[in-house]
Structure formats: structure tokens, C-alpha cells
Image: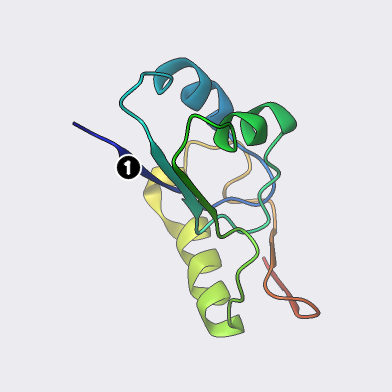
Amino acid sequence: MFVYMNLDIYANGYNYGIQDFLLKHIKGPWLRDLRLQNVWNMNIDKELLDFCTSPRFVHFADFRFRPMTVKIAAKVALHWQTSPIYSHLPYARTRPLFLHISRPYEITLS
């Protein structure tokens, strides 16, 4: 029985329909442990956040604002911009990727 989901999102403020996926496909009783991690500068809307933090989950860990070094952030950004799996996104090659690292540090890669 699947009871754990580790949601990794590499993006720059857009959820690419991730809330639709979660709300429509993982509402079953089998999911009891949900962790959001590797979610940097991700705007998670209220509906998705309410779903993730609902009493149905025994454990919910949100690592969106964990500290991250500039070196790691640069690697993530480079991967996001160059990986072929993201090439179908309309601005994957043209839009600069902005990552919040850990306050007060910021990095902009283009």
C-alpha cells in the first residue's frame, strides 16, 4: 500500500497544473504521508496547500523554505533550464529562471 509521496518540483513560480494532478488523482485513502520538498520559489495556491495540510495526513513536511546554498541552487537552475524533459514548456529556453535561495541571498540565472 502506497502511503508516502515525495513531491519534487523544480520550477520558478508556476505549478504547471500540479494542483490538478494532486486534487484529482491522489485523493484516495491510501495516501497518509505527504512531503513537499525541493520546491524552491514555488507558488502553491491556497486550495493545494489546504489539501496538503488537511487532517487526513498523519505527517506533512514542507521543505519549501529550507536553506539552500548558491552552489546547489545554481545546479538546480542549470538542470531546469537544460533538461530535455522541460523543453516542451513555452518559455523553458527563453525565460530567466529566478530562484529564492535562503534569505537574504538571491540568484538570477538566464
Report whether 26 appears left or right of 95.
left
Residue 109 locus on image (x, y percent): 66, 69
Above or below residue 86? Residue 98 is below
Residue 98 locus on image (x, y percent): 71, 62
Colour scheme used in the picture?
rainbow
Disc 1 marks which amino acid? Tyr
Of residue 37 and residue 108, the one placed in the foreground of this image is 37
**Residue at position x 35%, y 21% from top?**
29
Q: Mark 1 points at which residue?
A: 4
Above or below residue 93? Residue 30 is above
Of residue 75 and residue 48, the one placed in the foreground of this image is 48
Above or below residue 81? Residue 104 is below
Helix, strand, or loop for circle 1? strand
- The answer to whether residue 85 is visible is yes
Q: How crowded is mark 1: few (under 14 residues within 10 Å), some or many (20 or more)?
A: some
Of residue 71 and residue 47, the one placed in the foreground of this image is 47
Q: Quadrant of the C terminus?
A: bottom right
Q: In which quarter of the image is the N terminus?
A: top left
**Residue at position x 65%, y 36% from top?**
49
